[in-house]
Image (cartoon, helix red, strand yellow):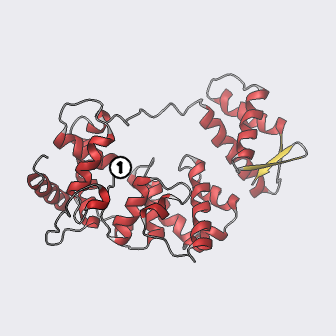
Amino acid sequence: MISQDPFRATVRAEGARLYRDLPWRRTRDPYEIWLSEVMLQQTQVPRVLARWQEWLERFPTVAALACADTADVLAAWQGMGYNRRALALKAAAETVCTDYDGVFPSDTAALKALPGIGPATAQGIRAFAFDLPGVYLETNVRTVLLHHFFPDVPGVPDRELIPLAASTCPGTGEEAGVPFAVPFDEGDTPRSWYYAMLDYGAYLKKTIPNPSRRSSTYTRQSRFEGSRRQKRAHIVRMLLDARASGAGALTLDEVRAGVDELELSAGRERVGESDVVSILDDLVREGFACETDGTWSIA
């Protein structure tokens, strides 16, 4: 095992130097922290700063989100990408309210059982809301571990990084596969440790060739312009606009005309009817839209 003490000293020092005073770091509310974790998965910090606060003004508690209309949740999420995440947020909020009386669980398995919450998000909630140890392996944490322990090594799998994350997080013990508990230094807790890792990792990505690209999990973001994802997002926005205007539902011809307008304005060809129908079928199946008598509306 590589000696961890110099590494931990470096991370603590760099974390203190680079600390970012972000609003979700001033709370211990697991709902607010969970929301920040989901928003930050694909969106840059400056944009999340505005949208996180806007969301909380609209849905201030997990109960408010659970009770909200699906259309209102989707409308609030517009511009954040991946509308599925908005539906997962609402579904998880409903489960927290029905199964846990509105109180977020702190157990890893219980968190991972909630819709849309994977291992990293679960540990982010545990670390930042409950100050509990564990393996929080997200892109900035990967960057730090790859930079220090795997310089110039390509295709590093997470199974090589997980023991390092576990054996450096304060308080982690056998529950994370480490046969000893990592000691706490003064002022050193899972919450403060992972904030330091995040800030140091963000700094490294700006100052050196991004080490996270050497992770076996790294994939380049697929092109959005002209993609099926863009057409899906555009149709969801059209259905939301129809609801807001009072029109309620759109016919297939209206949906197709809206998608064609998007494509033609970008210099691309019109979309085939079968492609539009396929997207609409997916949106209905996934709970985004409803179809009634040949018209479609937001769910």
**Residue named by callout 1:** 138
Q: Quadrant of residue 100?
A: bottom right
**Residue 35 visible in image:** no
Relative to the observer, which residue lies in front, 226 or 141?
Answer: 141
Residue at image location 38% in from the left, 73% down from the top: 27
x then y, percent, for residue 193: 23, 62
Q: Quadrant of residue 213?
A: top left
Residue at image location 71% in from the left, 36% down from the top: 279
Q: Is residue 256 above or below residue 237?
A: above
x then y, percent, for residue 252: 83, 37
- Report how many numbered discs are placed on residues in the image: 1
Relative to the observer, which residue lies in front, 62 or 52?
Answer: 62
Residue at image location 44% in from the left, 50% down from the top: 41
Residue at image location 75% in from the left, 54% down from the top: 299
**Residue 263 visible in image:** yes
Tell me the amino acid under the disc marked 1. Glu
x then y, percent, for residue 207: 21, 41
Q: Is residue 251 left or right of residue 262?
A: right
